Image: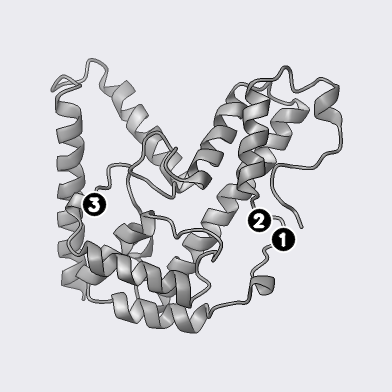
Amino acid sequence: MGSAFTKFCMQFCCCCCAGDEDDEDEKQPLVPQDPLEYFNREVQKRRDEETNLWSTPGDPSHSERDDDRALYALLQARNKTRMGSTGYRRLSVDIEAMRDTRREVRDKWKTILENLGFMAEADSLLTVSAGASHDRMRNAPAARALLHTLHSETSIFSSREPPPERYLFILDRLLYLDIAEDFLAKAKRFYPPKDDSDEEMPGLNINLPLLLARVEAMNGGGDDDEDESDRDDGNLSDRS
């Protein structure tokens, strides 16, 4: 098992590096004019990915899925809002609510992987870069079938929206390591399906249509410190 994982890591790193080089060759000189700036930018991109855990990591516009679009809109709205204002604090609460929801899903995956013996490798297996491409997957159909099964037969994801595409790439890795079926069995045992009434996660449920509408209205409005911001109309997330 250890040699298979090591081989996977080497191939994964090579593919990521090759993809990054292909994307950058036509846009960047072979030697960046400011290597430190380039390094800082790459570090920031990776930090952003790990912080936001984009549901569709290969979408740089963050607009293909409603939840990605909502989170991105919140981040952009907060960037335009004066720090410390009522609006800024409200946006920060909702941004963290969305991030917490995504971290909770990731933590479920990590728990299962660690239970399977991948204590040291879990974080690496769960890391998906923005350059992830379906073309580089080894067994996309089987990975998608497993993702559908996890979504319909476990509570590892919310049943109210499609499962995040980022986990398709992770399942492809698990298939390569020949542990995907073991992972599925553990997921069914640890996180059996729940009734809709049991699926509520207080404080973390996101009303995406309302959130998107409110952020769009905020982007077209004025200063968040005006009287409108001080009305007790609740946060953008659904805190039922």
Q: Is residue 48 above or below residue 127?
A: above
* Residue at point 72%, 34% (across, down): 89
Q: Amino acid at mark 3?
A: His
**Secondary structure at numbered mark 1:** loop
Foreground: 153 or 46? 153
Q: CA distance from mark 2 to mark 3?
A: 30 Å
**Secondary structure at numbered mark 3:** helix
Q: Residues within 10 Å of mark 3 (few under 14, many from 20)?
A: few
Q: Is residue 116 visible?
A: no
* Residue at point 33%, 21% (across, down): 37
Q: Is residue 61 visible?
A: yes
Foreground: 118 or 163? 163
Label 2 sits on residue = 205
On the picture, is 28 further left or further right than 110?
left
Label 1 sits on residue = 202
Q: Residues within 10 Å of mark 1 (few under 14, many from 20)?
A: few
On the picture, is 156 further left or further right than 79?
left
The numbered mark, 1 or 3, whose residue comes first in the sequence reads 3
* Disc number placed over residue 134 in the picture, else none: 3
Q: Residues within 10 Å of mark 2 (few under 14, many from 20)?
A: some
Q: CA distance from mark 1 to mark 3?
A: 35 Å
